[in-house]
Image: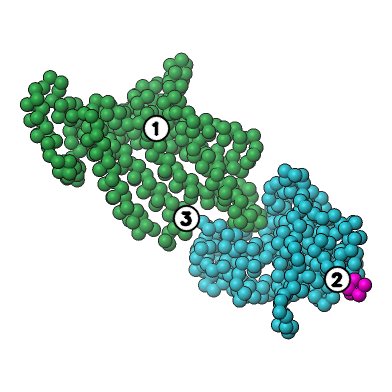
Amino acid sequence: MQAPLLAIDGLRTVFRTSSGEVAAVDGVSLAVPRGRTLGIVGESGCGKSMLSLSVMRLVPRPGRVAAGSVRLEGRDLLTLSPAEMRSVRGGQVAMIFQEPMTSLNPVHTIGDQIIEAMQAHEAGGRDLRDRAIEALRRVRIPAPERRLDEYPHQLSGGMRQRVMIAMALACRPKLLIADEPTTALDVTVQAQILDLLRELQAETGMSIILITHDLGVVAEMADEVAVMYAGRVVEQATARALFEDPQHPYTLGLLGSIPRLDEERDRLLAIEGAVPPPFALPPGCRFAPRCPFSITECTAAMPPLRELAEGHGAACIRAPVEQAVAA
Amino acid sequence: MLRHSLHRLLLAIPVLFGVLLIGFLLMQVVPTDAAQVRAGPSATPDVVEAIRRDLGLDQPLYVQFGRYLWRLAQGDLGVSIINNVPVSQELGATIGPTLELMAASLIWAIPLGIAMGTFAAYWRGSIADRIIMAFSVAGVSVPVFFLGLLLIWFVGFQWQLLPFTGRAGPVWSWDGFQAIILPAVTLGGVFVGPVARMTRTAVLDVLSADHVRTARAKGLTERLVVLRHALRNALIPVVTLIGLQIGFLLGGAVVTETVFSWPGVGRLAVGAILSSDLPMAQGTIIVLSAGFILVNLLVDVLYAGLDPRMRAA
């Protein structure tokens, strides 16, 4: 197997609070293969956004990455100097965010913001404007020559997200981190943006980390999936394996809460309770208090990620769940 | 944008009218009889009455106000009761030095305040931040006259470093430049603190915005992130707040001019009020408030220039 583009190992991101350090990301290990899409799924507050900001080394204060490594083609990003890290950001690893409404600076034109991204990574060129137009055209923005001189408020949400993507891809990054890229958009626009990301991936061969709480988006986009819960990866598999044969009770719960057209149901299943906050984690398995299959042993120790099949792991002592159900 | 500015200009008219009306009424409340002042302490009641009729002071208030507005519209601000010089002439002579002093104060106070505020915001919680904020609170708390007196006593009198009485010619001459230093330091000194504090708050606010995170994710240097993305956006509220603080600065100018015997509109106003020279006092009020309205108008236009979202509106 080819070496992964990005390998995250034992990553731990902590926040200092008045009641001591709390870990938003707690010992996460993941690999992003070249040219493929890794989906990271979880409820809000599970640490998936902090994970992506940790990769970019943009964790807001008072947070910091406390342990682990993030290797991009073998080079640990966490040990780079600030200047080296800057050239990685936007150059090799780019990021787009959830809120296209607020992620662009309202006082600069679209063109200036794209050109600025290009200037950050190469000595100035005369044809920057043409290249910015080209970048907009690549994300299928009509009349890019005119759009270039417009301000973000003159564009719709979908258009702004396209601009964000154009800006992120301006320097041909190897990895795009998309943090809930379609959550703030309405459904038709959402589909267009996902299609666009897929097309651009096919064109450029970049890898994508797609962070979402929407399993539908994962099913459509991801090759591999990691399910996160309370700062940890609880299940990891190829997208196909995860949807056909989910092993962790939390994944089962998530899948149970997606409405389906081919099944008649009066009520959607929901997982009772909420993700525990990082400063009030239960002992042992963090999902145990909400888990329908939990037994006393679950609270004894944190279950490690166990490989149940080739490339399919789950952090649950009761997995595979068929047995738990049978028992 | 042009429409926006015209709209603001139209809105300034009722404000100016209000200022004139209040200024006029205030002068009626003052326990001074203009006719008596004009006639002098030894005049007979008959003479005082004659002067009163002559000045139109025996008419009802609304007639007086109407006549006042009518004269004003023709550029006639009246004549000083004390020395018979036209008010407009006195104002014309003093407005230059006042503008000069304001400019000399703002030209260093605003950039310094913005720089300090930005620095403090970026290094929030650091020792530098605390020192800057302590300085700025001190700047807000120290009265203008006190700072002026301190500077006069030490820099001017004890150490004999700089002149501290009056204006010594245009700023670009060496004497004129030296003479304006202490007044400008005094008036600007009390302005640095508020500007620094407002800038710090505004920059802190913008630094946590999503688009600043985007700027960092693009790989921009911290310098560009702070200057082009944080400060540039923070200037929108800062400019507005500075505009509002200019009124405060005008008050400071009155005090500074008095303390340093600076021949400006502020000192003229104080002198006129102390000597019950009502037309002169009214004239200075008009000039000072027109200045305030003008500055706010300028801020509105500047605001639209800084925020592209305002241009379309």
Report the number of discs: 3
Residue A232 as seen in the image, left or right of residue B219: right
Which amino acid type is shown beneath numbered disc 2?
Gln
The front one of A45 and A275 is A275
Front of the two marks 2 and 3: 2
**Numbered mark located on residue B29 in the image:** none
**Residue A154 screen position, x and y as percent:** 50, 65
Q: Colour of chain A?
A: cyan
**Residue A260 screen position, x and y as percent:** 72, 80
In the picture, which chain is green?
B
Image quadrant in which the C terminus of chain A is located? bottom right
Q: Which residue is mark 2?
A: A247
Q: Which of the chains bears the disc numbered 3?
A: B
By secondary structure, the bulk of the magenta-drawn segment is best described as helix
**Image quadrant in which you'd find residue A236:** bottom right
Give the Cα separation between the discs numbered 2 and 3. 53 Å
| Vertical placement of residue A33 versus B201, above or below | below
Q: Which of the chains bears the disc numbered 1?
A: B
Q: Secondary structure at mark 1?
A: helix
Instruction: Write down the region rendered in magenta.
Output: A322-327
Observer able to see residue B264: no
Which amino acid type is shown beneath numbered disc 1?
Gly
Q: Which residue is mark 1?
A: B252
Q: Is residue B266 magenta?
A: no
Residue B138 as seen in the image, left or right of residue B25: right
Residue B102 as seen in the image, left or right of residue B117: left
Q: Which of the chains bears the disc numbered 2?
A: A
Q: Mark 3 or mark 1, which has the lower sequence index?
A: 1
**Numbered mark located on residue B307 in the image:** 3
Image quadrant in which the N terminus of chain A is located? bottom right
Residue name at image x 15 percent, y 21 percent = B41
Observer able to see residue A230: yes
